[in-house]
Image: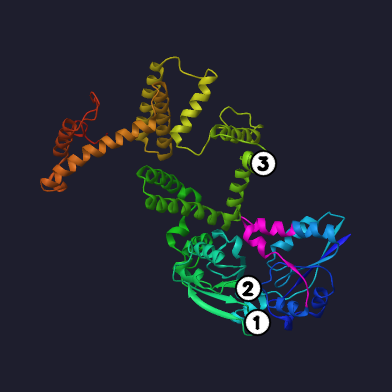
Amino acid sequence: MATIFVEGLGPGDTSGLPLGTWRRLTCGLPVVLRTRVHPVVRALDAEGVAYETFDEVYDSGESFAQIYREMAQRLKRWAAERGDIVYAVPGHPLMAEQSVQELLALSAGDTGLRVEIGSGQSFFDPVCTALGIDPIDGLCLLDGTLLQEDQLRPDLHLLIAQVFNRAVASEVKLTLMEVYPDEYPVTVVRAAGVAGEERIVQVPLHELDRLDFIDHLTSVFVPRADEEPLRRRDPWHVTALVRRLRHPEDGCPWDLKQTHRTLRPYVIEEAYEVAHAIDQGDPDVLAQELGDLLLQILLHAQIASEFGDFTVRDVYQALADKLVRRHPHVFGGDTARSAEEAEQSWQNAKAAETKDMPGLLDDVRQGQPAHAIARAYQERAAKVGFEWSDIGQVFDKLREEVAELGQELEVSNRDLTLAEMGDVLFVIVNLARWLDLDVEEALSAANRKFYRRFQHVERRALAAGGWAQHDLAALDAYWAEAKALVDDRVPSEHAGSPSQQPGQPVNRR
């Protein structure tokens, strides 16, 4: 069995190198260095130690993940060919050393190869010492070669290691700029703790990749953002703001009064606002409206957490579980070569979840307007014969429900009136289905028509002294003018005017 002895060269020169590590490096076994860019290498040269390096691999790989995988594969192959070898890396073998992790993964279960991890001091202690920071205050250690925007936490100090060259520094800069201002101060540390070579320079973020001394011994420190406005791009900070609104002692009185039920109308309202912003085609407006909708989600999650029902993390998990479960063509073994196949894959996964639901109406999607749900229910019922025989019966039912609504208006019971109004609307949806018309489209058209006509009424009223100078008859005359002036492509209207129906509201369509 061949053994690969992995040794750490520490952050500086041989003064900080353990004696056991030096003996391993000079014992006569073949030595492989991840990079020769390290202060200890000069001592190896002086001692006459022969070694190979992986420096050329950095120039040949397409990504750092590929580079580290190639290093591990070469080490395994060389050990099989040559026997025991020494692999030396900067710092500590298990601190920010992806090539070592790749090597450990390759050796797992391989009875012909053993990997022995040696000692070494990581760069972490001397960097913290050079910066004068205590990591217990909150410090996030990140890999510059794999840095992603969603890793950034402006409420924590960030230490970004493995900023090997200016190309990596440039990628790090661009990623940080997604969260931090261009002028945000960052500190670049090179060769921390190495006498005569240590460099500590603070620069504005946008100048990070302009420094000419960046190499394999370089790290970047991003201090915690103490200014509250800068943290507002962080999703968890926004979650904390919502939690603050619900603080029982000094939160917002309005937010504290809300419940799932009282917030229900706002969820619907904000969803429609998002749809309207999409129709406008304005990205800035859409971002604002999506934020308003997100507020509703966070408020509901916060209220639920106060009662021990669920938290915002449970919301995220439920969504993540569903995304994975319903995309077997992405996260599983299925394939989908087109949008249609992807849709079918989604539907198959959804059907598997609901295979025990016997009801004909149970799989109607609830996340849509109530009139759309009503139409879906009616269509399902019609398929099994639960249907009017002709449209005349639908009109008769509408008249019946309107009469019942009128009776409830005399009683003035809100709950009963609401129920009867629902019955009227349900029949109207059924009538639209019989006529093959869309209720939303029809109502939207009526809204636009009312808007155009009432604009004319408003202009005429304001030009003639204002609203207070006009009674209902005068306003209705302007309305009649609007009907004559504006082509609404409606042959005739049989509904009477407000002046012909005393007591009726003006805002008819």
Foreground residue, 184 or 410? Answer: 184
Q: Which quadrant would residue 448 be assigned to in this image?
A: top left
Which mark is first along the chain, 3 or 2? 2
Rendering coords of residue 300 (x, y %): 52, 52
Task: Identify which residue is drawn at 70% across, 56% down.
Answer: 69
* The furthest residue to the right: 1
Task: Identify which residue is drawn at 54% across, 57% down.
Answer: 302
Foreground residue, 464 or 354? Answer: 354
- Three-letter amino acid code of the residue under disc 3: Gly
Mark 2 touches mark 3? (CB < 8 Å): no
Q: CA distance from mark 2 to mark 3?
A: 40 Å
- Badge 3 marks a residue whose secondary structure is loop
- Three-letter amino acid code of the residue under disc 2: Leu
Q: Which residue is mark 1?
A: 194
Q: Is residue 68 magenta?
A: yes
Magenta stretch, residue numbers: 48-72
Q: Which residue is mark 3?
A: 332
Q: Is residue 197 left or right of residue 499?
A: right
Task: Identify which residue is drawn at 31% across, 33% down.
Answer: 445
**Given this view, does label 2 or label 3 mark the residue nearer the observer?**
2
How many marks on residues? Answer: 3
- The label shown at residue 408 is none
Name the quadrant of the N terminus: bottom right
The reply to whether residue 417 is in sight is: yes
Q: Is residue 410 magenta?
A: no
- Badge 2 marks a residue whose secondary structure is loop
Q: Which quadrant would residue 51 be assigned to in this image?
A: bottom right
Q: Please, is residue 222 above or below residue 434 in the view? A: below
Rendering coords of residue 20 (x, y %): 82, 77
Q: CA distance from mark 1 to mark 3?
A: 49 Å
Q: Residues within 10 Å of mark 3 (few under 14, many from 20)?
A: few
